[in-house]
Amino acid sequence: MKKRQVVYKRGGNHHNSSNSPNSSYAVRAVRYAECQKNHAANVGGYAVDGCREFMPCGEEGSGGALTCAACGCHRNFHRREVEGEAAARDGSSSPTSSSNM
């Protein structure tokens, strides 16, 4: 699978040159993981198809680039992982209800 790159705009400095060390843009690799489409939603259930990774049907820019070759779902149904964000989310702790007692 090809990794995609996305450009995020950071707050702060707004330089026109992308070559400067204080550039306001960062390039990060994006990967699309398992499919999360609920195929049983119309009957009130929950069932996923088991597709583990997005694989485009066609080349970048073609009509099939956003459709998964493995499961046939649109790319938006696949969990998006951005380089650097997944590690930050894994290390964070979620609030628990026991702390309010």
Image (spheres, rainbow, N blue to C red):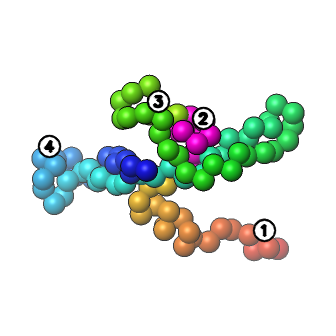
Q: CA distance from mark 2 to mark 1?
A: 39 Å
Q: Is residue 89 magenta?
A: no
Q: CA distance from mark 4 to mark 3?
A: 35 Å
Crowdedness near tag 3: few (<14), some (14–19) or many (≥20) residues, C-alpha within 10 Å:
some
- Most foreground residue, 38 or 58: 58
Q: Which mark is residue 16?
A: 4
Q: Nearer the viewer, mark 2 or mark 1?
A: 2
Q: Position of residue 64 (x, y in %)?
A: 47, 30
Q: Is residue 76 magenta?
A: yes
In this orientation, does residue 78 appear? yes
The amino acid type, in three-letter code, at marker 1 is: Ser
- Most foreground residue, 3 or 88: 3
Judging by the rendered image, the residue that carries numbered circle 1 is: 97
Q: Which mark is residue 82?
A: none
The amino acid type, in three-letter code, at marker 2 is: Gly
Judging by the rendered image, the residue that carries numbered circle 2 is: 72
Crowdedness near tag 2: few (<14), some (14–19) or many (≥20) residues, C-alpha within 10 Å:
some
Judging by the rendered image, the residue that carries numbered circle 3 is: 64
Q: Position of residue 50 (x, y in %)?
A: 68, 50
The amino acid type, in three-letter code, at marker 3 is: Gly
- Residue at horizontal 80 percent and vertical 38 percent from the top: 40
- Residue at horizontal 48 percent and vertical 68 percent from the top: 87
Q: CA distance from mark 4 to mark 2?
A: 41 Å
Q: Earlier in the sequence, mark 4 or mark 1?
A: 4
Q: CA distance from mark 3 to mark 2?
A: 10 Å
The amino acid type, in three-letter code, at marker 4 is: Asn
